[in-house]
Image: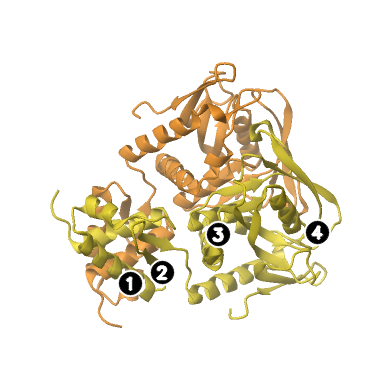
Chain colours: A orange, B yellow
Amino acid sequence: MDKLQRNERVSALIKILCDSPGKIFTLGYFAEMFGSAKSTISEDIDIAGNTLKRFELGNIETIPGAAGGVRLMPFLGRGRVHEVLHSLCGELSKSERILPGDYIYMLDIICDPERISKIARIFAGHFFSQGVDYVVTVETKGIPLAFETAKHLNVPLVIVRHYNEATDGSSVNINYVSGSSKKIQTMVLSLKALRRKSRLLFIDDFMKGGGTAKGILELAKEFDCEVAGIGVLIETARPQKKLVDNYFSLLTLNEVNEAKDLIDIKPSISWV
Amino acid sequence: MDKLQRNERVSALIKILCDSPGKIFTLGYFAEMFGSAKSTISEDIDIAGNTLKRFELGNIETIPGAAGGVRLMPFLGRGRVHEVLHSLCGELSKSERILPGDYIYMLDIICDPERISKIARIFAGHFFSQGVDYVVTVETKGIPLAFETAKHLNVPLVIVRHYNEATDGSSVNINYVSGSSKKIQTMVLSLKALRRKSRLLFIDDFMKGGGTAKGILELAKEFDCEVAGIGVLIETARPQKKLVDNYFSLLTLNEVNEAKDLIDIKPSISWV
């Protein structure tokens, strides 16, 4: 193989880090791949990392020691967070999204890969320091966002279901009360799905009363796991008191009013 | 801003292309961002593209003309496809995955972000030339794979559901017959979900009789859309005759036998 130039090495290096966000690669891995000294790779990483930081594109972390290496950290610069959330509010405020019963149509938003990828990077950056082992969601609408968050945190996704299926194997059922409608619902999770003593991040698209999140806290107990974080894309302003205390929401839905042709939604984060 | 060096420009450029796979960026976009001439950017792109090709990491396409630019094409090199599919077969063949009724436990696989991302790149690469407008899946287990495939094709995902919800708005229901169990099931899709005359790619994790895929063909008709491709992660060897003719499967499940403690699964693609 011809000797690689620095700009060739950084091209390959960044692509590899992007393909597996959060995964640790040793310097030796790149040294062998490129036929270069580890000191050279180390300089390559500095250049790549500084450039990503300069353009608010990402953050490459160097982990020292024998098990060390480099990884792409989940990150979205403040300017981009501002842009993403205000663009979402603009899109979600369109009155044609109002559905009967003062619901909002948002299936297109929660299935839009580019938007979801950016939102997931906000969640992954926020919860990274919690050291979570799994991202958990309840089917169906939060799955794309939860999957993408899990990807940026380099942990598996776990999907909690409403009904048991033969392909789940033996499972745990819990009943929980919806926070808003007060209806009793069921959550089902395969016994194989979680290692005991794990730390979970619950991600969902929407929180009204917080009943689903509370159900996840109960379910976690049955698996001897801990919920280390709760992230929701949209929370409703009412009821103000949710069934869970600590959660991180990106947008607050103040009002949907079909009669007034109005949707009032704002970023929840104070600095946005 | 200091003048950027080539290795800094290619670092930022590759990260931007990776963050939005399939999306077209103009040379002018990068020229403005980096304060460089378009001819310089064009050389940067050549270097980045040649390096990705050399390491089988990806494929940067240059689109000529006024609406032109560059984009990261969905791609996984043949060597990597081989590695991904054989690793999957190894993992799925483990006899502890056998569930009562000769089912396989595979929830961990279909929720593993790194594996799913690679599998999605195989599908996206295979179907890219079909010019699809949407990736469609039926809830629940195929959602991560379908979402990731949509991301690499730079098109929206559409999730077909089994029950109508208030947040879907007005919807179309169709009944279809499961190919294996012959049970009648329902598919529901919001009327807002698809533009008429679109081309759809149906992605699912599993195909036995092909009833779900046939249901999607029926549903597409109701929306005046066309199914341009069907991709499934695993098909069963029996029944050999499925309810749909043209589909692309990655793995073939020949046998699950609890009594013999055996799972026999092989890549479906001849050259793997």
* Badge 1 and badge 4 in a common chain: yes
Q: Nearer the viewer, residue B179 or B82?
A: B179
Disc 2 sits on a residue from what chain?
A: B
- For the image, the number of numbered tags is 4
Name the residue tied to disc 4. Answer: B100
Q: Are marks 2 and 1 in contact (CB under 8 Å)?
A: yes
Tell which circle, 3 or 1, labels the residue nearer the N-terminal end: 1
| Residue at 71 percent of width and 67 percent of height | B235
Q: Position of residue B169 (x, y in %)?
A: 66, 33
- Inspect this view and state whether residue A67 appears: no
Spatial CA distance of label 2 from label 1 is 8 Å
Few, some or many residues within 10 Å of mark 3 (<14, 14–19, 20+): many
Of tags 3 and 4, the one toward the viewer is 3
Few, some or many residues within 10 Å of mark 4 (<14, 14–19, 20+): few
Disc 1 sits on a residue from what chain?
A: B
Name the residue tied to disc 1. Answer: B51
Name the residue tied to disc 2. Answer: B57
Q: Position of residue A191 (x, y in %)?
A: 69, 49
Mark 3 lies on a secondary structure that is: helix
The amino acid beneath tag 1 is Thr
Few, some or many residues within 10 Å of mark 1 (<14, 14–19, 20+): many
Name the residue tied to disc 3. Answer: B116
Disc 3 sits on a residue from what chain?
A: B
The amino acid beneath tag 4 is Pro
Spatial CA distance of label 3 from label 1 is 24 Å
Of tags 3 and 1, the one toward the viewer is 1
Tell which circle, 3 or 2, labels the residue nearer the N-terminal end: 2
Tell which circle, 4 or 2, labels the residue nearer the N-terminal end: 2
* Left/right of residue B56 with respect to residue B198 in the rendered view: left
The amino acid beneath tag 2 is Leu
Q: Nearer the viewer, residue B262 or A110?
A: A110
Mark 1 lies on a secondary structure that is: helix
